[in-house]
Amino acid sequence: MRADRPRGWRLVGRYTVLGVVAAVVLFPIYAVLLQALKSGPDALDHPSSLLPTHLTLDTITTAWTDGNLGRMMLNSMLVSLLVTAGVMLTSLLSAYAFAFLRFPGRGVLFVFFVATMLVPAEVTVVINRRTADSLGWLNSYQGLVVPALASTFGMLLVRQMFLTLPKELHEAASLDGVGHLRFLWEVAAPLSRPTLGALGLFTFLGTWNAYLWPSQVITDEAHKTIQIGLEDLKTPGDISRFNLITGGLVIAALPIFVMLVLFQRQLVRGLTAGAVKG
Amino acid sequence: MKRRLRDVPPALAMLVPSMALLAVWTVYPLVMAFINGTKSCDSTGRRCNDVGWQQFSNVWQSREFQHALGVSLKLAAMTVPAGLILGVGLAVLADKHLRGIGFFRTAFSSTVATSVAVASLVWFVLLQPEIGVLSDLFHEWIPSLKQPGLLRDPGTALPAVALSSVWAGLGFTFIVITAGLQGIPRDLYESAYVDGAGSWRRFTNVTLPMLSPSILFITVVLTTRALQTYAEVSLLTGGGPNPEKSTTTIPYLIYGRNSVIQNNLGLKSAAAVLLFVISLVFAIVQFRGFEKRVQYAR
């Protein structure tokens, strides 16, 4: 006699409600996908026909070539991979220092790290743009990658994981004369693989989706990321080309949807890391 | 003492990369934003003269900032309650042991896969007055969908931006609240059930109180996000429609393409610092206000 196991008509009702709500939530995605799979004229004539007719990949392929999307996807991929690798490395190193090493000033430094988390990008972007400018980093990959390479969130996540490892492990290793880097690389990091996976996925998504910073430092075609470049498909005057943007949206969203489906568990872990524990 | 110092060199080596990056790209710009906020500079930012702390209150009192503040607050007043209620609703709905519930969970969390830019452009397409699907479907009930278009009507542009923003944030809220729900011990529900509590009583007396840490977290995150809304505005409305500037939020006032303070580093810095302070005040008030009511499990 469990409270949450309905039967019969109540069960049908449950599924109906779930189905309707899911349809509403997914509707924007479905409508855009369908629009992208119609040819330009078809989409203009029957914008709201919600059943698939005459599906074609024309819109998507035209968006790909006209929008220079290949280059932009490559830029986004490169920047996101570099930032992800960098953040995992700097987070592992700083987390190790805070979790395993004893040194004077550790508490103060830790507070310094955590305090930086309170500073929102919206405040720092004004000055960071000028810093990037004076380094000659506007319209460059360095400008997109380097400022994002340290993450306090990552340090906290990995440190939390390290603190759950048995103390004896580290003590035994240092008695055996195992160096810090070797212990980190061969013992601590492999044992923290799920946490690192969550951090990596989370960082990748965050970088891939970034908008404000790229929009401030990148203006040339060669370095545009997909997030700021998609907008170029918005051609205001020409309604017959309006459909192209739906093709661009499908291309831009596809890799992330695939990742979501593949790594749902890691994503949930990353997103909820700060939220659930009181 | 010797043992304490032995760890210093490796610790330093391991912390230097992160510290250097945080110092250059977070601490330095924060400090400089305060300093530059007191200056008035030309467009290159090289030649500056001192205006003093006065400039912060000048910016605060300026018509542009007050207007943008109003827009940002209105946006938060729309997106935070809507996002929270819908997110909790979806999570409670999907928190059932049913066959195939995994499919619905994936569907409800799917908007985390759309970036703010993608989500905004999705709504831009749906709301396009001539051929947007929503405009086509509902224009008989809401005429402004066609004429002039939801995003071009000064009265509806901000709610439309809010709609896009709530949808984009739904997946995140759903995931966090779902995790919160799964942390609630089942025996609490069972004893409430035994005591004769109906499903609404179980929701208000067990679910909501036990969920309060997640709700507090989401409230703070959604409020901060609302106050920092930039991409949606940039892609959906460009701060317009003009001349009302109905969707010019504070971040758009600072970073927007046709912002009136575009080339003035001093004013931009001052406005950015004020935005920071406003977000901070909101977060502190929310934490304080909730603190007494939030129940942390054990």
Image (cartoon, grey):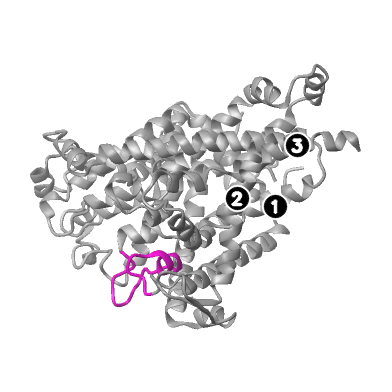
The one nearer the camera, B173 or A99, is A99
**Label 2 lies in what chain?**
B
Q: Which residue is mark 2?
A: B22
Q: Nearer the viewer, mark 1 or mark 3?
A: 3
Q: Earlier in the sequence, mark 3 or mark 2?
A: 3
Nearer to me, A101 or B78 = A101
Residue at the image position 15 percent from the left and 48 percent from the top: A47
Chain of the residue under the numbered disc 3 shown in the image? B
Chain ID at mark 1: A
Q: Secondary structure at mark 3?
A: helix
The label on residue A112 is 1
Q: Quadrant of residue A239?
A: bottom left
Indicate which label's residue lies in the foreground, 3 or 2: 3
- Badge 2: how crowded within 10 Å, few (<14), some, or many (20+)? many
Among the 4 quarters of the image, the one containing residue B285: bottom right
> Compared with residue A55, is residue B227 higher up or lower down, i.e. above or below?
below
Dominant SS in magenta: loop
Residue at left 32%, top 38%?
A: A73
Left or right placement of residue A165 versus residue B37 in this view = right
Residue in the image at 19% along x and 61% along y: B140
Question: How far apart, in angstroms, are the residues tagged by discs 1 and 3?
Answer: 19 Å
Q: Is residue B56 magenta?
A: no
**Residue B130 in the figure: left or right of residue A251:** left
